[in-house]
Structures are given as C-alpha cells and as structure tokens.
Image (cartoon, helix red, strand yellow):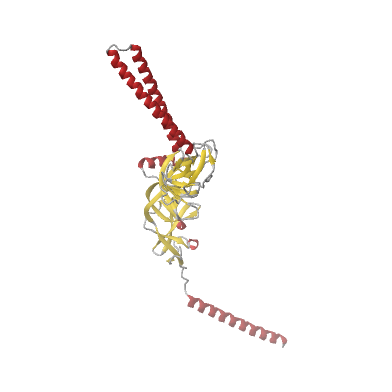
C-alpha cells in the first residue's frame, strides 16, 4: 500500500512539472514573436561642410612695442626755466613750444656783440675810404706807395674783425634759440622732470622730459628660421602682413614687415623681425607686450572644423556623412588656423563631415543630423 501511494504522488508531481514547462515555453515563444527583429541604433550627430577657401599661412609670436623715435629733451645752456607749456603725458605736435628758458643774459651779450660789430663796420668803411683816397693821390704823385699799402692792410684787418664779430653774434643768436625748446616731432610727452624756477644745465643727467613717437610704431618679435625663406619671398612680392593684438582685448593694429635681422640666433634658432604699425588710434603703447601674427601669404585650401578631425593608430581621419550613414575617410592635416584644419588630401571640398558624436560611430553606422548647439 505504501509503495502504491509513493508512485501516485511521484506521478502527480511529474505531471505538474511538465505542465509548468509547457506553459513557460508558450509564453517565451509568444513574446519573441511579438517583439520581432531588432532595428540598428541611429546616432544623432552634428554635420559641417568641408570648404575650399583662402587660408593665410601665418606664424604666431610674442612681440614688444617700441617707438620709432624717442628723444630725451635737455637744456643746452645754463639758465633757469621760466615756463612749462604742456601738461604731463599730453599729446604734442611737431614744433610745439615745450619749455621757455631765461634768455636775459644772452640778450645782453647779443646787444654787446651788435655794438662791437657796428663799431668795426664803421672803422672798415673809414679804412676803405683811405684806400680810395691814397689810390687817387698816388696817381697824381701826391703820396707814396707805402701809404697805399698801409691803408689796404688796415682795411683787410677790419674786414676780418667784422667777420669775427658777425660770427660771435650769430653764435649768440643760436644760443638764444636754445632757450625755447620745441617738439622735434609729433608724439606723446612724459611728465616734466623740472618745473618753473629750476636751474638747468647741459651737464644734467636727467632729461627735462621724453617724447615718444606714437604713430607709427615698431613691433619687434622673433620667428623660427624655417619660415625665413618664405618670409623673404613674401617681402619681395609685397605680400607680408603683421597683426598685433593686445592680450585680453580684441583691439589690434595692422602693419607690414619693416626689417629682418641679418643674423639668426644660433642658441635659439630664431630670427628677429620688426614690423611697422600705423597705430593711428594709439592702440599700441611703447613697451607693451602684444600677440603678433605674421601673415606670410594666403593660399587656397580645403578646410574642415578642427573638431571633425579624429586620430587613430593609422593617422588622422574624419567621418563623412553619405546616404544616411557614417563612413571613415582618412585625411592628411597640414596645419590649423582659428578653429579650422587645413586638409591636404582625402577630401575634395563639399563633403559633409561629422563634428560631434563621433564616439558612438563606426564604419556604416546610421546617423541623423541635428541642429548645432547654441554658441557652437
């Protein structure tokens, strides 16, 4: 009896297990049938055009602004300052009066020299009359040749004296001109180191003031020796250009190359270049460090956004959008310029390249273009 019961219970349990297995298999089959085949994932990407356009060939460097002309004003006579005609740091024009010095002593010396000159000129006129008179008398036999010769000698001596007095007078007038100090060129003047009443002399080491020419100005910077040949060719063709920008600001000044140093620094491999900038608005201030861009030439090239260029073990490549799919396109990049890369091979211009979303792409991945992000 016990054996029969055990067999019955085992049969019931087997029937229940079989029913549960068949039910699970039915559910699994119906779910798979409802889901169907899976679709490939579509990646959202940003797309830009590969363009053919003029791109400058340039070199970036750090430069220093220096004035073309800078003059330290000094007194050439020993006297006192009567008046200062400018405000500290003011803009001055060529010929403007800057300082007036005391000229009373020189004026007195000029009057003395003028008196001596007038005296000697009168003596010369008398001697010349004697020469004429003795010349007439010797023709009539009323005087001797010695008197004629003595009269000529006296006239010649007075001629030399008059010339010496005239030279002394001219020198004093030049000395007086030094008592009025004018601006030798247009520019900006520094603060006056002396004020009214100060005694000045030529031996003073400190200048009265300093004038710097502000327009145009020089910008001096260094470039690698590898671009020296291209730069000289550009200068010969008149195509070189220099752009100087103040760090932290967008204001800049344009100019051209004025001079290339005749020696390359053997320790650094750099050569010094000097550009002349118009600086009509006085954007560049002498002594300022500026970001310089030397534009050697402009050439036609195919460009893509730098964000589109990817790197692998085999070199640079970009993803090209074609027929709704991403395709890998190897490229050669020669240089970058303001967020774009210049492509020398691999693209012909006009292709749609992917600039964002490349991490999820591979060859043949389906893609969907999206609008660029704000501010991109």
User: Where, by quadrant of the figure, is residue 18 drawn?
Assistant: bottom right
**x then y, percent, for residue 14:** 63, 82
Up/down of 362 relative to 331, above or below: below
Residue at image location 49% in from the left, 76% down from the top: 35
* Rendering coords of residue 148 (x, y %): 34, 15
Give the residue at x 40% y 65%.
Answer: 324
Can you tell which quarter of the image residue 170 is in? top left
**Image quarter hosting the N terminus:** bottom right
Where in the figure is residue 273, as x and y percent of width and height? 45, 41
- The location of residue 275, given as percent across then percent down, is 43, 44
On the question of residue 223 being in view, the answer is no
| Residue 24 occupies quadrant | bottom right
Of residues 205 and 332, the one nearer the viewer is 205
- What is the total number of numbered labels drawn onto the structure image? 0
Residue situated furthest bottom in the rendering: 1
Residue situated in front as seen by the camera: 78 or 208: 78
User: Which residue is at the front of the view, 366 or 104?
Assistant: 104
Give the answer, above or below, for where 249 lies relative to 365. Answer: above
Nearer to the camera, 303 or 110: 110
Q: Residue at x 35, y 14 (%)?
A: 147
């Amino acid at each position: 009896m016990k054996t029969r019961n055990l067999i019955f219970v085992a049969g019931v349990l087997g029937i229940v297990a079989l029913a549960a297995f068949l039910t699970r298999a039915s559910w699994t089959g119906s779910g798979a049938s409802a889901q169907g085949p899976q679709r490939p994932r579509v990646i959202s990407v940003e797309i830009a055009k590969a363009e053919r356009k003029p791109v400058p060939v340039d070199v970036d460097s750090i430069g220093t602004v220096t004035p073309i002309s800078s003059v330290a004003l000094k007194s050439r006579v020993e006297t006192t300052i009567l008046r200062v005609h400018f405000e500290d740091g003011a803009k001055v024009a060529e010929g403007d009066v800057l300082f007036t010095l005391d000229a009373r002593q020189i004026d007195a010396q000029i009057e003395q020299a003028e008196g001596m000159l007038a005296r000697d000129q009168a003596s010369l006129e008398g001697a010349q009359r004697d020469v004429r008179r003795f010349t007439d008398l010797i023709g009539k036999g009323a005087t001797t040749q010695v008197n004629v010769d003595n009269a000529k000698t006296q006239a010649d001596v007075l001629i030399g004296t008059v010339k010496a007095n005239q030279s002394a007078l001219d020198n004093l007038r030049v000395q007086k001109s030094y008592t009025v100090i004018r601006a030798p060129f247009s520019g900006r003047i520094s603060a006056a180191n002396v004020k009214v009443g100060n005694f000045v002399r030529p031996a003073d080491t400190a200048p009265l003031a300093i004038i710097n020419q502000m327009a145009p100005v020089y910008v001096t910077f260094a470039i690698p020796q590898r671009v020296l040949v291209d730069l000289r060719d550009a200068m010969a063709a008149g195509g070189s250009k220099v752009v100087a920008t103040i760090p932290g600001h967008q204001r800049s000044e344009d100019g051209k190359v004025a001079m290339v140093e005749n020696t390359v620094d053997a320790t650094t491999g750099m050569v010094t270049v000097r550009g002349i900038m118009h600086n009509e608005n006085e954007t560049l201030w002498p002594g300022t460090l500026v970001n310089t861009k030397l534009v050697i030439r402009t050439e036609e090239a195919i460009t893509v956004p730098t964000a589109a260029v990817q790197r692998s073990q085999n070199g640079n490549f970009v993803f090209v959008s074609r027929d709704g799919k991403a395709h890998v396109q190897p490229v050669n990049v020669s240089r970058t310029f303001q967020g774009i890369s210049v492509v020398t091979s691999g693209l012909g211009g006009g292709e749609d390249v992917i600039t964002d979303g490349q991490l999820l792409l591979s060859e043949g991945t389906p893609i969907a273009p999206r609008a660029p992000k704000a501010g991109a």
